[in-house]
Amino acid sequence: MSDTFHSTLDVFHKAFITNRLGDEVSELLTGEKVPRAPQIKDGASGTYRMLLIATRNEWLYLRLKELLHISGIQGLQFLSGEICTHQHKRVTEHNGEVVWEETDAFTVLSPHYDEVISSIDRLQQWCLSNPDLAAPILGTHPEDLGKSIESAFFTLNTSDDGFDGGEGADFMFCVLRTIGDLMRHAKSQQCFAVYRSTVYDFAMVKPQCLAG
């Protein structure tokens, strides 16, 4: 039996953070009360993007954690499920009794656009330079690793683009390619960027310490 784990990367103008994430999370991430912005049609501002990542049995997080550890690369530990900048507990009640609790991990990536982009580039270069180490971790052949990196494409929904299982080198490098492109978009538009996943065993870090 397998479980699918989901995470998202949202990019939007800060003025819309309360609309996107709600009052509590908005104040948690910004340290201020941001009033709701007037409703507009999705995409009308030309800046909102959301990447939905679905991976089976934490495949992406575990493989990235191993690659980052062996390569010594910093700056992507939020994606491997090791750190976050904020946590928020969601509680569901029924007839006054708590029936479900779940804690979301949020990592504010703005203004660390360049650090994230650089970390992705360095990880890809490390994989190309060390295919005999990287390929077994990703379940591929060393000679195929370069093809996976070169053929990576931009996708906002991995499940809709042939990666239903959320596994494999092609899947991981498409996710990294998309995150890099979204960071460039966020930087050019001066957007707020936040990564969200479910908390399991995260270490809390200060926002300014995201990338080493």
Image (spheres, rainbow, N blue to C red):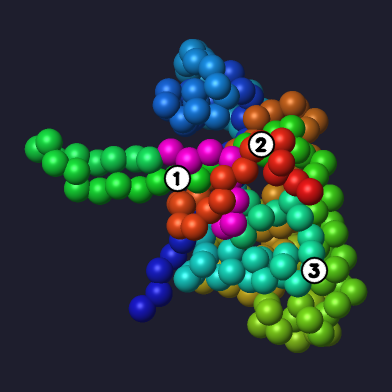
Residue pointed to by mark 1: 104
Q: Amino acid at mark 2?
A: Pro
Mark toward the start of the polypeptide (3 vs 2): 3
Q: Residues within 10 Å of mark 2 (few under 14, many from 20)?
A: some
Q: Report the magenta residues as a range.
A: 81-88
Q: Amino acid at mark 3?
A: Ser
**Residue 75 drawn in magenta:** no
Residue 45 relative to residue 33: left or right: right
Dot 3: what SS? Answer: helix
Quick check: marks 1 and 3 in contact, CB under 8 Å?
A: no
Residue pointed to by mark 3: 71
Residue in front for this viewpoint, 194 or 41: 194
Figure quadrant of residue 89? top left
Residue in front for this viewpoint, 32 or 201: 201
Q: Residues within 10 Å of mark 3 (few under 14, many from 20)?
A: some
> Is there any visible trace of residue 181 in the rendered image?
no
Residue pointed to by mark 2: 207
Dot 2: what SS? Answer: helix
Spatial CA span between label 1 and label 3:
28 Å
Spatial CA span between label 3 and label 2:
23 Å
Q: Main secondary structure of the magenta part?
A: strand
Dot 1: what SS? Answer: strand
Which residue is found at the position 57% from the left and 45% from the top?
204
Q: Whole-percent x and y of residue 20?
A: 49, 30
Q: Whole-percent x and y of residue 127?
A: 82, 72
**Residue 87 drawn in magenta:** yes
Whether residue 197 is situated above or below residue 40 in the rendered picture: below
